[in-house]
Amino acid sequence: MFQIMAFIFTLFGAYTLYLTSRHQQWQIRPLKKSYRWLSYGLFALALYCFSLSLSFTPALFMWLFSSSTVLTLMPLMAALKVNRSQS
């Protein structure tokens, strides 16, 4: 249960962090920079949820792996969206 919550927090944290970037392609204008603190909090909450269900080392690995995977996929998904709307 906590692992699923951690993945959801990671997903929303990455989504919020990506939308605050000025290079994001999902909205016309990026979100305010103050929303980055929300995404950092969601990432910390995800790490906490991982640590409740796993010991520290696997929790840290899962948190780093899931964060880096989702943060890598956000710009790629936005590029696919832009390519589909142009064709």
Image: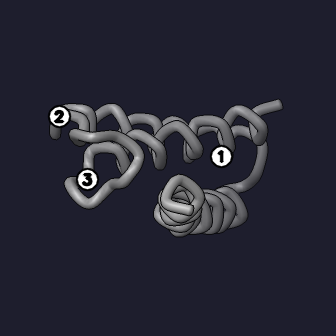
Q: Which three-letter amino acid code belongs to the residue tagged 1?
A: Ser
Q: Secondary structure at mark 1?
A: helix
Is label 2 or label 1 in front?
2
Q: Position of residue 56 (x, y in %)?
A: 64, 57
Q: What distance separates the C-alpha of mark 2 from that of mark 3?
A: 9 Å
Q: From the viewer's side, name the closer residue of 54 and 9.
A: 9
x and y percent of residue 48 in the render? 57, 40
Number of marks in picture: 3
Give the label on residue 51, or none. 1
Q: CA distance from mark 2 to mark 1?
A: 30 Å
The amino acid at mark 3 is: Ser
87, 69: nearer the viewer: 87
Of the 4 image quadrants, the one containing the C terminus is bottom right
Which kind of residue does numbered mark 2 sit on? Lys
Residue at figure coordinates x 47%, y 49% from the top left: 14
Residue drawn 26% across the image and 60% down it = 23
Mark 2: which secondary structure? loop
Q: Which of the 4 image quarters holds residue 69?
A: bottom right
The furthest residue to the right: 1
Residue 76 locus on image (x, y percent): 54, 67
Q: Is residue 64 visible?
A: no
* Picture quadrant of residue 10: top right
Q: Tell me the SS state at disc 3.
A: loop
**Residue projecting furthest to the front:** 87
Residue 32 numbered mark, or none: 2
Q: Residue at x 34, y 40 (%)?
A: 27
Location of residue 80 in the rendering, given as x and y in whole percent from the top left corner: 58, 63
Query: Mark 2 or mark 3: which comes first in sequence?
Result: 3
Residue 78 left/right relative to 17:
right
Query: What number is the disc on residue 21?
Result: 3
- 49 or 19: nearer the viewer: 19
| Residue at image location 56% in from the left, 47% down from the top | 47
